[in-house]
Amino acid sequence: MPVIELKNISRSYRNGQVFINALENINLSINEGDFISIMGPSGSGKSTMLNILGCLDRPTSGTYEIAGRRVEKMGDSELADIRNQLLGFVFQSFHLLPDLNALENVELPLIYRGLSGSERYKRSVKALKSVGLEQRIHHRPSQLSGGEQQRVAIARAIVGDPKVLLADEPTGALDSKTSESIMEIFQELNNQRGITIVQVTHEKSVAEYGHTIFHLRDGKIEHVENVIKQK
Ligand code: ADP
Ligand code: ADP
């Protein structure tokens, strides 16, 4: 079942008299439980695509349906609801709050949901456990390695039980060995919890953790690559 369906999505930007088509007639269907990677040269539309998928931006034309809800015409507050209820975000630079410890960072999205303190604690510890950080819950970001910080960010992204995890260069700030361990966590979330994952990456070895790689060029899907897993 598709959890995400983009039909004829275009997004153009106006620069004075000039229009730039950042995305042109994109059709994309992502099933529940998929693990998708998006690659492409700089300027090919990756960020625009992720911003639209993440309900941070609206397409200029076309339709976007996520979990059966049409979002392309929604207003800002409805889009914020979709982000809070259905999506989790992971970034290249972690985006943790430096004055909060790991646990408090992970609890943040739950505060907006009005959950009780004990419920927040329970869920956040569980999320930190699932990324292997139960021994570090009282550490601040500055006391953690890059890989550990990204694991806190992943715990924060999944603590609200999102349907889809969106990741923007999740390994861009990490060495290759740490990158592998982050991808193994993504694999586990995907295999064992059925979370749908969409990641943008420059690194082929990271992209290949996905089942399918979409190669963007000049705002179009140039090539769809099915990853053959070799074990
Ligand atoms: P990528 O993430 O692959 O580098 P982007 O989605 O950032 O690509 O950009 C796609 C195209 O849209 C580029 O030509 C870029 O210059 C243009 N673009 C992106 N954002 C804006 C903006 N806010 N205003 C004008 N042009 C933009
Ligand atoms: P980097 O990955 O280089 O650190 P950022 O993480 O700052 O870059 O931004 C990546 C994209 O995520 C941006 O295009 C931005 O619009 C989007 N973004 C920024 N803040 C949020 C947020 N709170 N929730 C979801 N997306 C965000």
Image (cartoon, grey):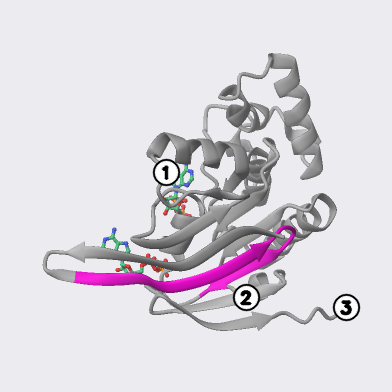
SS for tag 3?
A: loop
Residue type at tag 3: Lys
Give the x, y percent position of residue 14.
20, 63
Choose the circle earlier in sequence order: 3 or 2.
2
Disc 1 versus disc 3: nearer the observer: 1
Give the x, y percent position of residue 25.
42, 73
- Residue drawn at x 30%, y 66% as measured from the top left: 12
- Residue 22: image quadrant is bottom left
- Report which residue position mark 1 lands on: 74
Q: CA distance from mark 2 to mark 1?
A: 29 Å
Q: CA distance from mark 1 to mark 3?
A: 44 Å
Disc 2 versus disc 1: nearer the observer: 1
In this view of the protein, can residue 172 be seen by the observer? no
Q: Give the position of the C terminus as an image quadrant.
A: bottom right
Farthest residue toward the left? 17
Choose the circle earlier in sequence order: 2 or 1.
1
- Mark 1 in CB contact with mark 3 (< 8 angstroms): no
User: Which is nearer the eye, 184 or 10?
Assistant: 10
- Report which residue position mark 3 lands on: 231
SS for tag 1?
A: loop
Q: Is residue 208 magenta?
A: no
Part of the protein shown in magenta: 19-39
SS for tag 2?
A: strand
- Report which residue position mark 2 lands on: 213
